[in-house]
Each structure stands twice: as structure tokens, then as C-alpha cells.
Image: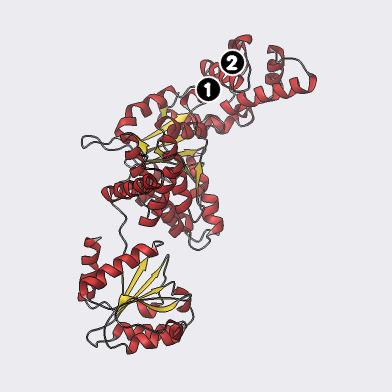
Amino acid sequence: MQAQVRDLEVMLDAGAGLLVIESPDEPQVLQLMTRLALARSLPLFCWSVADGLRSLGFGERVDSQQYTEPEPLLRHIRGYSGGGLFVLCDFHPYLKDEPLNTRLLKEIAMGEAQPRSTVVLLSHAFSLPDELTHYAARFELGMPSDDQLLGIIREEAQQWSASNRNKRVKTDSRSLNQLVEHLKGLSWGEARKLARNAIVNDGAIDATDVEMVQRDKFTLMNRDDVLIYEFDTARFADVGGLEAFKAWLSQRQQAFLEPGPELDSPKGVMLLGVQGSGKSLAAKAVAGVWNLPLLRLDFGVLYNKYFGETERNLRRALQLAEAMAPAVLWVDEIEKSLASGDNDQGTSKRILGTLLTWMAERKSRVFLVATANDITRLPPELMRKGRMDEIFFVDLPSAAVREAIFSIHLQKRGQEPDRFDLGRLAGLCEGFSGAELEQLVVSALYRVQSSGGLLSQEQLEQAVLSTQPLAVVMAEEIDSLRAWARERTVPAH
């Protein structure tokens, strides 16, 4: 915090009469202002609409009720002759369509009397009127470092111990380091709250607490609902086939989770393939096998909910993904997200530019998994090496993979795969996708439920014979996709 005090002193020496601080952590900012006031021997005042103007221990006492309204408050500050720091909490509503308040703040900022007063506008978000931007300096409250986060955890552990007959908080070095990792990107107050929640329930910090903190952190930071935290992540055992993709991920797991100077951290992959071939399940499996949070970027919400400010909210979503790092970011059917239309007004191009810049320049450990069905609708810039590590083609499953998929879905539904001739079933299902194979099992089980008895080989074969796969219904489109991918992508199976 001492370094931040020095940064603020530089701003004051440069003549800043108006400071803007955007932070949800008001107590931490007020503590910082108190240290600044002490360092510069300045009177310190704080204003809120609830309490009016009050002294924080430095300078003259004021009648708080006399300055509850913005206009008399600003006139008082403009005429204050002693120089001082005035922190105005949540003042932003009083600058919107309020020309008098804007003018008074401008006159305070332009004032040349010595010693001069400085107004600090403090809120979770602050958009200044154009008239004030030239006179204002913005200060960003730094997030706690690793050592400071560890200090917060130890302080909370000591407080819990003091309240519980000096019992020690149980933990291990791995869980403690993971907790510090997942508290990164939070404000001081938020980090303290989540650290306290991790300890208070059972007096321990373990893997369960770390996962809880992960989810609570996402809830705290996801104010725009553009990102979705996928709690149900798959295991590779739930994914039939994709052996080449699995091997590729295994080779890069350590480089991503524990990056070193000799190898660049993996950035991400594109999974291209036939609909229902298991691309989404594979995306979930990346997070599951690497034991990372899976965040899904919902472009539908991005476009529909925030018309006119889509790019800004995409940047916020990407910043949140970085704050959750290490993490997997999943964009499903990305070609639909970036396709432009007649009424698009250039939004898709700007979205693409924002996404490409982030993909090329990001330093955080966010592994991007994008899935697509139609390669012709994807902009070529997205496919360039350096933005994606590899493009995998998820083809229709082979006979051996179809047999494995049948086994997985029968087991998931309480059936014993050994009772069935899976090789014969796989042979009957030439051209079926993984999703279609799953639905065959579901369809046969519905028939069993309505008629009673046990699931049989005959019922599964009847389900096969009564279904036309997508490879037949859309044969031309799928053949074209396969031909394109043959020379341009890496087979995932």
C-alpha cells in the first residue's frame, strides 16, 4: 500500500484537483486516503448521501447535516481555504444531467489557490461528463499481491483460531497455494470475505474449499452474465474416441498448468466437425481432465442484452476469464457468433477484432476451446497459427469408436454392455454421430419403459433401423466438410 501512497503523492504534486477511483472496495480506498492524508499532513473529509460531510480525524469538524445536498457541498469545497482531501462516495448520480454540479466541480479542479483541495470521486464505476475529463486523473487501486493474499488468509486463520479455543486451521501447502491463486484478481475486501468463508465452516482449507472459492469468485465478478460457469465438466472416460486429441492435450497439460521459460503456454484449439460428433463434450473434458474451471462465452447474451455496447462487454468477459485463470474458455458454434448480417452495423467485425487482439496478445493462462460446424463461415484471420495452436477435425466415429460410445451410454444408464453384441450394433450404425448413438440407447429404453422387461439387443437394433442419421439427411454438406478438412486439419480420432 505504501507504493500506492507514493503514486498518489505524485499525482498531487502534479496538481491534480480531481481524482477518479473506480473500486468496489470502499473501506480499502478510505484506508489508503487516510495514509495519504497522514503522509502529506492534509485534512481528510468523506461525503456520502447517507451521512453528509464528515471529518475522518484530520482538520476541522463540520456539521454533517449542513452538507448532505451536492450543491452546498461543492460550494463549501470550492471555498475551502485550508487545502484538503475530499472523498465523495457514490457521487456519480449527481453529475448526470446536472450542469450546476458539473460546473462547480470544474471550478474546483481549475482552482489555483495554494494549498489546493483535491476531490476524490469514489464509486464502483464512474463515467465523467465530457467537461471534466480534461481536468481529472484516474487512479487504479492495485489488487493484493501473492504475499498480501497469503497475509489475508493468515489473518483470517488467526481470527478463527482465537474464536475457537486456539484450534489451528488445518491445511496443506497445495491447497493453500491454490487458494492464493484463486483469490487473485479480487479486491482486498472480496479476497478477505472469500478467505473467511473458506475457513469458517470447518476450520480447514482443502480442495473442497478451493473449489467453493473458485465458484464464489466467479459469482462476485460476473456482473454481466455473459460468461457461464459450467459446473458439470466431463472426464475423458466419458468421451468415446478422440485419441489423437487426448494425446495432444496430455502432452501439453504440464506446460499449461506449470509453465516454464523453455516452452510457451498452450493457447487453444479449434474443434471442427459434424454436428453431434462430440465437440462440446470434448471441450468440457479439457477442463475436467486438467481440473480447471470451465467458462462458456455466450455470444447470444452478448449481442442481445447489450446492444450498442457489445465490444465493451466482450472485453469485460475476457478480463473476467483472465481473472479466473488458469481456466478453460469455451466458445460453442463460434461461426454463428461471428457471422455478420445486413443489419449488423459492423458489430461482428469489431467483435472479431477485439477477440483476435486478445487471442494474440494475452499472457494469462486461459485455454480457448472453440467449436464449429461450418468452416466456410469462419473468418480466415481466426484460423491463423499463433492464435490457435491446432485445428482438430472431429469426424463421424469409426466402428471401434461407435462400439466404445455404445458401451459408455449403456453404462451411464445402468445397463451392462457385456449383455449386448456391441460389434454388430456398431456395424449397423455406419454414419451415425455420437449424439445419434446416445439417442438410440435413450429411444430403446423408452420402449422398454412403456412395455416392461429388460433392454434387449433386438430393441436396440429396431431403434437403429427406424432412424436416419444426419450423414444421410445432409450427405452433400457433410461430404463437402470432410473433403475440406482432409488436407487442412488434424484428425481428432
Say whether residue 56 is visible: yes
N-term mark: 1 or 2: 1
- Say which residue appears at 41% left-offset and 69% top-offset: 126
On screen, residue 134 versus residue 311, left or right, reads left
Task: In the displayed orientation, state which residue is furthest to the front.
Answer: 165
Q: Which residue is mark 2?
A: 426
Disc 2 crowd rating (10 Å Cα; few below 14, some 14-19, many 20+) is many
Towards the viewer: 8 or 402: 8
x, y percentage for residue 393? Answer: 45, 30
Image-based side of 18 in relation to 243, left or right = left
Residue type, mark 1 in image: Pro
Task: Give coordinates of residue 100: x percent, y percent.
Answer: 44, 87
Residue 288's disc is: none
> Is 75 rendered above or below residue 158?
below
State the residue at coordinates (65%, 26%). Answer: 439
Q: Identify the residue position indicated by label 1 in the image.
A: 397
